[in-house]
Amino acid sequence: MSLQLMIFIILVGGWLAGRLFTRVGLPGVLGMTLLGIALSFVPDALVPPVLTGMSPFLKSLALIIILLRAGLGINRKTLAKVGKTSLFMSFVPCLFEAGALTLLLHFFVGFSYVQGAVLGFLLAAVSPAVVVPSMLVLKDRGIGQEKDVPTLILAGASLDDVFAITLMMLFADMAAGHGAGSVGMSLLKIPYSLLLGILPGIIVGTVFVVLFRRFHTRIRATEKALLILGSGVMLVQVGDWIHTATLLGVMTMGFILLEWAEPVAHELASKMSKAWVFAEIVLFVFIGMSVDVHLALGLGGHTGAGWVGLLVISGGLAARSLGVLSATIGSGLNMKERLFCVFSYLPKATVQAAMGSVPLAMGIPGGDLMLAYAVLSIVVTAPLGLVLIRAFGPRLLS
């Protein structure tokens, strides 16, 4: 199959699938994801290697676009209003879910507690690819604006990923036989990752504030968008080199621009909204393509998670839901709004697709089964979370 044909299927097919699902009252991104899952059945020999090689970059670019949109829509007053609760939302639900999964995997699957913690924190990361665009849709429609619920979820979900990935790698080092005595140092990586992730975003954002204020009329809006997108790509690359949370830095860049160069921020937000039409299709179709249904269900001779996997993942989601309800105690949200937060924290996709094969690559016992659980969690929770967010957002939020 040629590269041109695959790109045609991804772009045009993704657009058609999205429109079809929207027509029947379902989230359009669900149609794009299911198209990607269908494409995952195409034999590897027929998929152009260049497309496989481009996939991580294209998914990363799409995430940069959506996180820039998020940052360009969050102002300081709103962030201060939801700050304490979003901080609790960044780690309490994750700890509830990972803890429950560690126990369930020990008793039902036979994993050691360390193996269970590796997979527990891998599965506990909420998906920014699903949550962020869904919250932006609600913000654009003015839903949940009274108490800034979408902003609360945006901030909390972004920090949740940093917390989950850092602790997953801590336990992965233990399971692989290195770093068992460095728990304290590994925990210190969380503030390190946050600080060195956000700081470059502040610096680059400030540089752009000065540049765009001085040459506001001489640099076209499209050129500004290209400059900020290119810088976002470089920030993520630097973060990969030094292992920091640079996706937060990308969001911070947008936040700084909104705070100190608001007219420019509105220009850029408009451009990012248009770029998202393309990026959304690419992101969700590629996420679907990263799913191996045979692996998730244990078909075709694969070691799969199967029905036990569904039971374990469901138990983890139940614990996460209790964690969300606990984190929002005293937040001023009513029970309907807290229930919406529960729904918004269900979807898994981005981290599980990107990190699912890490335990296997590190030689951790049971790594093949961990990958199967990661895949199954995407298949189950991404559609479930999408449907619940889109269906109940307007009903549960004011």
Image (cartoon, rainbow, N blue to C red):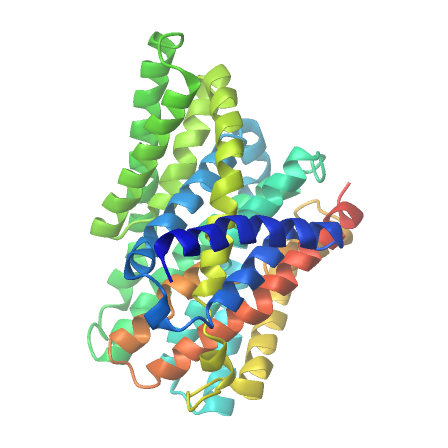
Q: Is residue 359 left or right of residue 151?
A: left
Residue 101 position, x and y percent, is: 50, 77
Residue 222 visible: yes
Left or right? Give the position of 232 relative to 310. left
Residue at the (38%, 87%) spot, across then down = 112
Q: Quadrant of the N terminus?
A: bottom left
**Looking at the image, which residue is at 47% across and 81% down?**
294
Vertical comparison of 353 with 160: above or below: below
In the rendered image, the quadrant that contains the C terminus is: top right
Q: Residue at x 29, y 61 (%)?
A: 49
Q: How many numbered circles are shown?
A: 0
User: Which of 171 and 68 lies nearest the eye of the viewer?
Assistant: 68
Q: Nearer the viewer, residue 282 or 107?
A: 282
Q: Is residue 85 visible from the viewing direction of this image? A: no
- Give above or below for 339 relative to 357: above
Residue 272: give x, y in percent of width and height: 48, 32
**Of residues 190 and 365, the one drawn nearer to the viewer in this rendering:** 365
Question: In this rendering, would 273 be left or right of 110?
Answer: right
Measured as percent of width and height from the top left, residue 293 is found at 50, 76
**Residue 355 against residue 247 in the figure, above or below:** below
